[in-house]
Image (cartoon, rainbow, N blue to C red):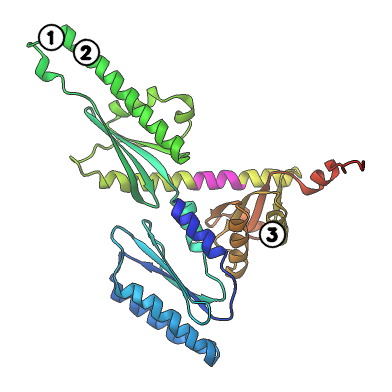
């Protein structure tokens, strides 16, 4: 996720030139040849919209994109974003993604980054703990793909029964080992979520083992549990659980998005820390008072790109809303504020002249 953030910041920081820049989003679950054909159909109609000089730059950028397609998709990705520009300031950037993005192609003076922003918001990182009696796989999932995997196991005790221990001693040791096993899982989860800054935790497995882990979670981790999946892995294959976890996470993200919009609605009603509309939102992001930019995917492309580019450069968090009537009624965009500028100005005190 950090590399995606760095790529988004780098793209948002690119200076504008007269040469067209191609932003191409490919579905890597489709054959490269199919995506190449889509690009060809799009480019044949777009090329004529540029003057002759810029048509040459466009073709140069297109060749750079086609080179990426010809090399095939990077392993493990479900989408690939390619940004390329020709002319006097050539550039090329390839961004593989673990989540699927709808194919789209754009040619403009600046890169189109909203699909990356949307993927980052929708498929943010989360942690899932897949529990069984003997082990727990603790996975970090980033943009739909496993980015880190940790394993906790409980030691085998059966061989010592009758040889070194009585049955009562064996069951006592078994309970103690399971207690330590659960504590180890909690420690691993806590360390991973703290180290990576995660706010979402999913639990999966047989309800008996999920409940044991859930009961052992400290309050700060229990508050971050956003879903449970009552399914055990098929041996070492946990792909179906990952698919369900992604659906559960997206649903939780959607609920958080609604809560943020409702909070914005409440702030606007009481004249509090919120503004709506394109101009007011741009002003809040520019002057540093914006805490969260809430933007509809239905906002026109040009305005949407300007807002997310500025928010990225100002390090303002972005929440993308999908078909939300509340935010659409506000013109498709709003901001939750850290403070109101007029209040900040009224509290400003000039330094005394000595």
Q: Secondary structure at mark 3?
A: helix
Instruction: Say if mark 1 contacts mark 2, CB within 8 Å.
Output: yes
Which quadrant holds the C terminus? top right
Closer to the chain start, of discs 2 and 3, is 2
Magenta highlight range: 254-261
Residue at image position (18%, 8%) is 169
Q: Secondary structure at mark 2?
A: helix
Callout 3: few (<14), some (14-19), or many (20+) C-alpha neighbours within 10 Å? many
Q: Which mark is residue 282?
A: 3
**Quick one: 313 or 302, which is closer to the camera?**
313
Closer to the chain start, of discs 1 and 2, is 1
Closer to the chain start, of discs 1 and 3, is 1
**Quick one: 295 or 331, which is closer to the camera?**
295
Q: Image quarter for residue 140?
A: top left
Q: In whole angstroms, how far apart are the C-alphas of marks 1 and 2?
A: 9 Å
Residue 171 placement, left or right of 257: left
Instruction: Say if mark 2 contacts mark 3, CB within 8 Å.
Output: no
What residue occupies the far bottom of the structure in this picture? 52
- Provide residue 8's location: percent of width, then percent of height: 51, 60
Task: From this view, report whether residue 128 is shown above or below residue 292.
Answer: above
- Provide residue 321's location: percent of width, then percent of height: 55, 54
Q: In whole angstroms, how far apart are the C-alphas of marks 1 and 3?
A: 71 Å
Dominant SS in magenta: helix
- Provide residue 240's location: percent of width, then percent of height: 27, 47
Residue named by callout 2: 173
**Residue 46, visible in the rendered structure:** no
- Provide residue 118's location: percent of width, then percent of height: 49, 57
Verify whether residue 257 appears in magenta: yes
Q: Which mark is residue 165?
A: 1
């Amino acid at each position: 996720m950090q590399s995606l953030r760095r790529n988004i910041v780098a793209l948002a920081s690119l200076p504008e030139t007269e040469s067209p820049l191609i932003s191409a989003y490919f579905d890597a679950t489709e054959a490269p040849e199919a995506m190449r054909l889509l690009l060809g159909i799009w480019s044949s109609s777009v090329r004529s919209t540029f003057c002759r000089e810029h048509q040459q730059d466009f073709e140069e950028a297109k060749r750079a994109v086609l080179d990426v397609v010809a090399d095939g998709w990077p392993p493990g990705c479900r989408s690939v974003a390619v940004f390329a520009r020709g002319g006097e300031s050539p550039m090329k950037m390839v961004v593989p993604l673990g989540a699927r993005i709808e194919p789209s192609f754009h040619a403009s003076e600046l890169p189109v980054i909203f699909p990356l922003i949307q993927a980052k918001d929708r498929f943010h990182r989360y942690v899932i703990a897949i529990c069984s009696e003997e082990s727990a796989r603790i996975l970090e999932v980033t943009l739909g793909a496993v980015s880190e995997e940790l394993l906790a196991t409980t030691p085998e005790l059966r061989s010592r029964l009758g040889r070194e221990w009585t049955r009562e001693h064996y069951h006592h040791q078994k309970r103690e080992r399971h207690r330590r096993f659960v504590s180890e899982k909690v420690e691993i989860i806590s360390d991973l979520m703290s180290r990576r800054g995660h706010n979402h935790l999913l639990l999966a497995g047989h309800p008996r083992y999920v409940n044991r882990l859930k009961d052992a979670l400290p309050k700060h981790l229990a508050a971050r549990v956003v879903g449970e999946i009552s399914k055990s892995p098929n041996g070492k294959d946990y792909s179906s659980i990952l698919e369900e976890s992604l659906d559960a996470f997206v649903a939780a993200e959607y609920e958080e998005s609604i809560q943020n919009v409702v909070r914005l609605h409440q702030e606007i009603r009481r004249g509090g820390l919120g503004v709506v509309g394109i101009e007011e939102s741009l002003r809040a992001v520019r002057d540093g008072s914006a805490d969260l930019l809430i933007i509809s995917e239905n906002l026109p492309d040009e305005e949407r790109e300007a807002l997310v580019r500025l928010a990225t450069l100002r390090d303002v968090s972005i929440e993308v809303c999908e078909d939300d009537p509340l935010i659409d009624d506000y013109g498709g965009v709003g901001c939750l504020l850290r403070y109101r500028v007029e209040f900040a100005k009224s509290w400003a005190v000039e330094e005394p002249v000595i």
